[in-house]
Image: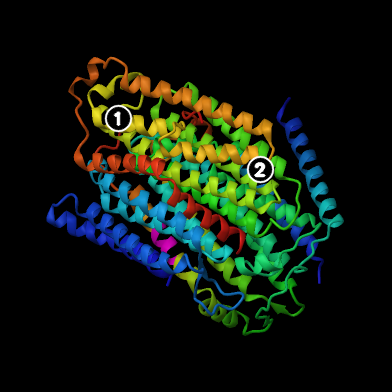
Amino acid sequence: MNKIEIAGIIIVVVAVAIILIFIFILENSFPAFTFAKNAWKPVEISEQLSAEASRFMWNYRSLDLIAQVFVLFGAAVGCLAILRAEKEENE
Amino acid sequence: MIMLDYYIVFSIVLFFVGIYCLATKRNMMRIILGIEILINAANINFIVFSVYRTEGFVDPLAHSIVIVSIALAGCVTAVALALVVYAYKHYGTLDVRKLKRLKG
Amino acid sequence: MFTLPIDILLIFAATTPIVGWIESKLGFKKLCGIYATVGLALSSYALYNLSMQALQNPILAPSDAIPSQSCLRIDALSIFLASIFIFLGFFVAIYSIKYMEKDSEISLYYALLLAMISGMMGVVFAGDFFTLFVFWELMCITSYVLVAFRKKHWEPVEAGLKYLVMSSAGSAAILFGLSILYGLTGTLKFVQLSKTFVLTSNVWGYVSLVFILTGFGVKAAIFPLHMWLPDAHPAAPTSISALLSGIVIKTGIYAIIRSLFLIYFPINFSWQTALMVISIMTMCFGNLAALLQDDIKRLLAYSSIAQIGYIFFAISVAITQTDVTIISYSLTAALLHVMNHAVMKGLLFLCAGAFIYKAGTRSLRELAGIGHKMPITATMFTVGALAISGIPPLNGFVSEFMIASSGINSGMLVPTAILLANFLLSFAYYLRLIKIIVWSVPSKKLEKTNEAPILMLFPILFLALSCIIIGLYPNPFIDMANKAAWSLLKY
């Protein structure tokens, strides 16, 4: 098999897969928020949206933010640890 | 508005594009990009759902989740790139097929 | 912020690099290790204080959280798992003081170690799926780096890269599953999910379940997703292998249990048999692959896959049943085996690390007969190996017996028979291991080796002691695991 045949097969498979996913999703339309029974804080789409969203984030998702700070710290320390200078670099 | 289902088709297809990228690409950089694609598929899903909850309003919860998850994706990429630098030092190539000394 | 035990660990993690700088000025090599050990000890004390309240009724922090607010929720299961994490982490920190002394920039190692343990504790404390995910990433990212910490050699780098790619693809799958869950319910908080999510016949429930289960399954190394484990665990420094094998893969188990029992339990999905088949394949694969390994750490890593299979077996028994006593019994068995496996596999890996530290090789052929040169370590290794293969007075017997009897109680005789065959199989290769280590004639290469240093012997002795204690007096531990199982059932 040459490259063009392989590419053709791959394209056909991908197309079939996309069509199958499409049919599956159209058959089972996504029941968005059908099971949502809890209260939530809607924000109107306006120019204030970003300010509102960031206020929400600081007020209510602060635990995630602080945890994320430590993830950043861990990644920084990790990069330092991997890129640290070592005496003999050969295997 | 456009039907929600089209967006979900898009994000699921994007997810499988990412999986395909992880499975077939040989360049390590492309594999890292594949991971980014996977995470972004999920992010798109969150954003779309936040808009579709009620017409004209958005749910700020999904926005905060996406902001945090973008930062997490950045962390993973940073560590991955640092590892790729060392893999390049050891093997002299970015081709993952050369990295098959382990049996697992 | 995140309750005292995690706070202490995070603060110690953030200050360890500074202590490393002071250490380099003073020239006192062990300062960082001692600092990290002190941090873990303080954190375990704080955890003890916290557990007094949390065992009575679950703690919510912050207590007045609104529905979309991130929160922590600490119940008996969280306390149970967190105390295992701290327990093993403490001994590994002591062990690393000696084991890692030849490596450079050791302060970064301890910072990553503490960050990893705090990430794991955050995973079990989280009361919101996304908070869990953030802590999950903290644990994952630090563990990638720790696997590749000895980057001078090619093996850790390659294994670390492989681990990173597979595990972060798993994390992305979790995030995708969470997004679908969010689309269905509008919340990611456990309390709301357990109330609102009554999926009766919706196919999207399956979709989110598949994504979440796949994502957590990568970390828990269940059968088709285990490929990273046999590479990453041997390649890491041995102290890290003990942590990875002992507790990091258990966080995957925890997350799977939590999501199955919290969100997907009310629905009568028909995937229970699939879960059972996966668990049996996991244990068969792990045991068969471990039979003929020559690398001691690789053998232990494959054995970890098999043990995950046992734990998963008990979970799938619990999922199939409707009788609540059988459910709680098999969950207790699973959780008890989580604890026992952490202790036993930690012990085995630390002993193997002592052998490697002294002999400088991982090959069993070259390690043959090292028991004559290192009698104490070899005795403790024998204790661990006997415990993990289920010999009565030791702790492995208790939980393995409970897993098997939960299988028999629920009437699944064929899977239980396969389980028992697997116990025999694992006994076979651990006997082979003991035979090679203890009853062989030492080769000439090993003539100069002697007993491991005291800082490495102390954690080994203590872990072996706890193996024996849990085996002789299992009742308080069974009660604890039972409480944890009930806290899972009555969220």
Label 2 Cα neighbours within 10 Å, binned few <14 / some 14-19 / many ≥20: some
| Residue at x 71% of width, y 30% of height | A3
| Residue at x 36% of width, y 20% of height | C436
Asked if one can make out residue A88 in the rendered structure from this viewpoint, the answer is: yes
Give the amino acid type for the residue marked by disc 2 in the picture.
Tyr
Magenta-highlighted residues = A69-75
Q: Compared to C145, does C408 lie above or below?
A: above
Q: Quadrant of the N terminus of chain C?
A: bottom left
For residue C195, side relative to residue C22 (left or right): right
For residue C47, side relative to residue B48 (left or right): left
Residue A78 coordinates in the image, percent (x, y): 38, 53
Question: Which is more toward the observer, C239 or C433?
Answer: C433
Q: Nearer the viewer, mark 2 or mark 1?
A: 1
- Does A71 lie within the magenta span? yes
Give the amino acid type for the residue marked by disc 1 in the picture.
Thr
Question: Which is more toward the observer, B20 or C169?
Answer: C169
For residue A30, side relative to residue C424 (left or right): right
Which of the 4 image quadrants contains residue C114? bottom left
Q: Quadrant of the C terminus of chain C?
A: bottom right
The reply to whether dot 2 and dot 1 touch (C-beta < 8 Å) is no
How many labels sit on residues? 2
Mark 1: secondary structure: helix
- For the residues beneath circles 2 and 1, the answer to whether they share a chain is no
Residue with the mark numbered 1: C379
Residue A50 coordinates in the image, percent (x, y): 59, 79
